[in-house]
């Protein structure tokens, strides 16, 4: 009876956490949108982008992949609020890991991973100075992931729903107006959550990964000339089966080139 009560309490707490993240996101990336304006915006703006940037990344799971930001619509408010919806697509270039489950897990842990990845991101300004700012960033999305082939012609695809809540800090390190060059730094420590069906967790991860998995992460990077980004991400899920490879700290290094601002 006590075990059932604990399970019920844990389930209620997790349901509350999921509901809270969904509510925050709807009421308002791997790739954080930097704010290049040094002063307060005089008016709000709405922009639409197609095929905006390409990203190549490699992880500690020995997975090399290529991603593209296919579509983005973004709104920037006068008071510093930002809302965007982005569609990414990712394809594997090289698998150095011989364990299929870990190759599939890499798509889960890649913030822009998945054959198709739809992401809502919003941020709220906390403070702003001439060369730096800090915000609360909230991200929510869904990935369509193609895992390892399954026997008996069963579908090898599944959906992974995810959320991230974190503190975004950015600062201008160097700028040369005459040469039109700039160098920005940003960091984003965050809490993360992933949700998928019991069936997909069993088929692709041998039930070593919970249907609702949560953990923490840190993203930081440098951006040169508002076009070239070097990104380092570290993440770990904490409620996985003990001694499972899915509970290890995962690193990812990415290089992104933006075709359009």
Image (cartoon, grey):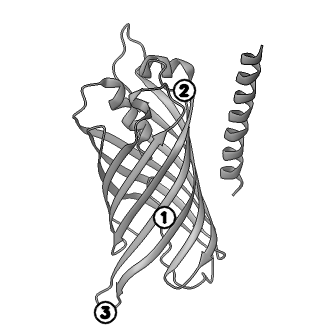
Residue position marked by numbered label 1 in the rendering: 33
Residue position marked by numbered label 2 in the rendering: 210
Q: Position of residue 162 (x, y in %)?
A: 55, 41
Residue at 51% from the left image edge and 80% from the top image edge: 37
Q: Position of residue 133 (x, y in %)?
A: 55, 75
The CA span between labels 2 and 1 is 31 Å
| The C terminus - image quarter | bottom left
| The N terminus - image quarter | top right
- Asked whether, in this view, residue 249 is left or right of residue 138, the answer is left
Q: Position of residue 152 (x, y in %)?
A: 38, 7
Of residues 213 and 197, which is closer to you in this image? 213
Question: Disc 3 on helix, strand or loop?
Answer: loop
Q: Nearer the viewer, mark 2 or mark 3?
A: 2
Residue at 53% from the left image edge and 48% from the top image edge: 119
Residue at 60% from the left image edge and 59% from the top image edge: 122
Residue at the far top: name it: 152
Neighbourhood count class around disc 2 (C-alpha, 10 Å): few under 14, some 14–19, many 20 upward: some
Q: Position of residue 151 (x, y in %)?
A: 36, 10
Question: Disc 1 on helix, strand or loop?
Answer: loop
C-beta proximity under 8 Å, tags 2 and 3: no
The CA span between labels 1 and 3 is 25 Å
The CA span between labels 2 and 3 is 54 Å
Residue position marked by numbered label 3 in the rendering: 178
Name which of mark 2 and mark 3 comes first in the sequence.
Answer: 3
Residue at 72% from the left image edge and 47% from the top image edge: 23
C-beta proximity under 8 Å, tags 1 and 3: no
Q: Nearer the viewer, mark 2 or mark 1?
A: 2
- Asked whether, in this view, residue 63 is left or right of residue 212, the answer is left
């Amino acid at each position: 009876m006590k075990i059932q009560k604990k399970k019920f309490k844990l389930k209620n707490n997790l349901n509350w956490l999921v509901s809270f993240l969904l509510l925050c996101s709807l009421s308002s990336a791997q790739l954080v949108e930097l704010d290049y304006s040094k002063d307060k915006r005089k008016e709000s703006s709405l922009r639409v982008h197609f095929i905006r940037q390409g990203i190549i990344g490699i992880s500690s799971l020995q997975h090399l992949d290529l991603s593209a930001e296919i579509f983005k619509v973004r709104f920037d408010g006068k008071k510093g609020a930002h809302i965007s919806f982005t569609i990414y697509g990712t394809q594997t270039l090289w698998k150095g890991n011989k364990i299929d489950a870990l190759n599939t897990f890499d798509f889960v842990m890649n913030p822009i991973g998945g054959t198709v990845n739809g992401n809502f991101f919003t941020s709220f300004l906390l403070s702003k100075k001439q060369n730096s700012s800090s915000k609360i960033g909230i991200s929510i999305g869904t990935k369509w992931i193609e895992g390892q082939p399954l026997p008996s012609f069963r579908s090898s695809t599944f959906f992974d729903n995810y959320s991230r809540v974190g503190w975004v800090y950015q600062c201008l390190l160097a700028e040369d107006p005459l040469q039109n060059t700039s160098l920005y730094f940003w960091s984003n420590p965050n809490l993360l959550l992933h949700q998928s069906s019991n069936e997909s967790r069993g088929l692709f991860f041998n039930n070593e990964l919970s249907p609702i998995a949560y953990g923490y992460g840190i993203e930081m990077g440098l951006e040169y000339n508002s076009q070239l980004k070097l990104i380092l991400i570290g993440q770990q899920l904490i409620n996985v089966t003990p001694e499972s490879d899915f509970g290890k700290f995962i690193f990812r290094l990415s290089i992104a080139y933006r075709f359009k601002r």
